[in-house]
Amino acid sequence: MILSVSRRTDIPNHYADWFLNRIRAGELYVKNPVNAKQIRRVDLSPEAVDCIVFWTKNPSGIIDRLDELHDYHYYFQFTLTGYGRDIEPGLPDKKKVLIPLFRKLADRIGKERVVWRYDPILINDRYTAEYHEKAFSQIAKSLSGYTERVVVSFLDMYTGIQKDMERFGVGEAPEGEIRNLAGRLAAIAGDHGLEIVSCAEAMDLEAEGIRHGSCIDRELIERITGKSLPVKKDRNQRPACGCAESVDVGAYDTCPNGCRYCYAVRSAARVRANRERYDAEGEMLCGELQK
């Protein structure tokens, strides 16, 4: 079994205590986001977990506690973009805090186990294609030697984010603009020795130098674990997603990062209400296990 920790919320940043407590307990419970009455018990024993895939924008909550995962294989998807506080209000300074944290994490666990995500790419009057090219180049230079791969994707206009995106003047970028920018990003990545792949991108960008990628990547996991995994494509993700099947242990409407493009948060009020229910000793994230 592969654990996804988590597409739905930033557990390494905000809920590391809970997750590590559950690791020690050997199990957790997770609610089906489609059917709240359906609860799944997840076996967290080292024998049951082939690999843990962490998703984060700030690993500060877990980076100094990785020794507690000595019996597990894992890697990180670390999102670093060029956006300011208008789009990512809950994150610390990128240059002063997050880039040094990325380097520290890579030094600790190896550059092959820290994947850089520059995603999603949204375009408006401030965050133009030229802006993204410059920001991507600066970050790539800062991370050169600290990662092997960068994952990119262009914004999908989910129903829940449309109002925020309209408020920031963000719309669907023309295909030609996407292709031109993709080609420039691929060239920059190549200059810094980085493999560049796309995440759940319906558009074929092979000609621009970006192949379809997998965030929960069976090949990478097999390289990390040293064993073959007979896992299938995750049928619960979007058709263009190439991820291997996994069990996500997070919960929607629990992440306080506040990113305006986030599909996993319906409102800040829901996040506040759920975080009031957070118990680091609980069996579920931001919820209680009922009879």
Image (cartoon, rainbow, N blue to C red):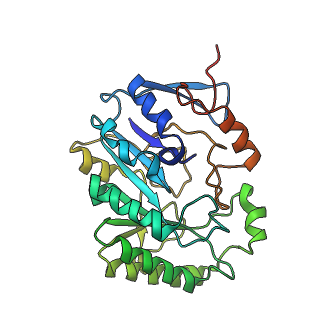
Residue pictured at 44% horizontal, 24% vertical:
27
Say if 102 sits above or below 236 in the image. below
Q: Nearer the viewer, residue 285 or 32?
A: 285
Seen from the viewer's position, the closer of residues 96 and 276 is 96
Q: Is residue 44 above or below residue 66?
A: above
Residue at the front extreme of this rendering: 96
Q: Quadrant of the C terminus?
A: top right
Quarter of the image that includes the N terminus: top left
* Quarter of the image where one finds residue 70: top left
Depth check: 78 or 245 in front? 78
Q: Residue 147: image x %, image y %? A: 32, 65
263 vs 119, left or right, is right
Give the image quarter of residue 44: top left
User: Where in the figure is residue 163, as x and y percent of width and height?
Assistant: 78, 63
Q: Residue at x 61, y 71 (%)?
A: 84
Task: In the rendered view, tell whether residue 265 sits above or below residue 34.
Answer: below
Which quadrant of the structure image shows residue 289?
top right
Residue at position x 57%, y 60% in the image: 91
Q: Relative to the observer, which residue lies in front, 177 or 253?
A: 253
Location of residue 58 with respect to 95 vertically, above or below: above
Evaluate whether residue 267 shows in this view.
no
Image side of residue 126 versus residue 20, left or right: right
**Residue furthest out toward the left:** 226
Residue in the picture at 54% in, 54% down: 239
Q: Position of residue 167 (x, y in %)?
A: 78, 69
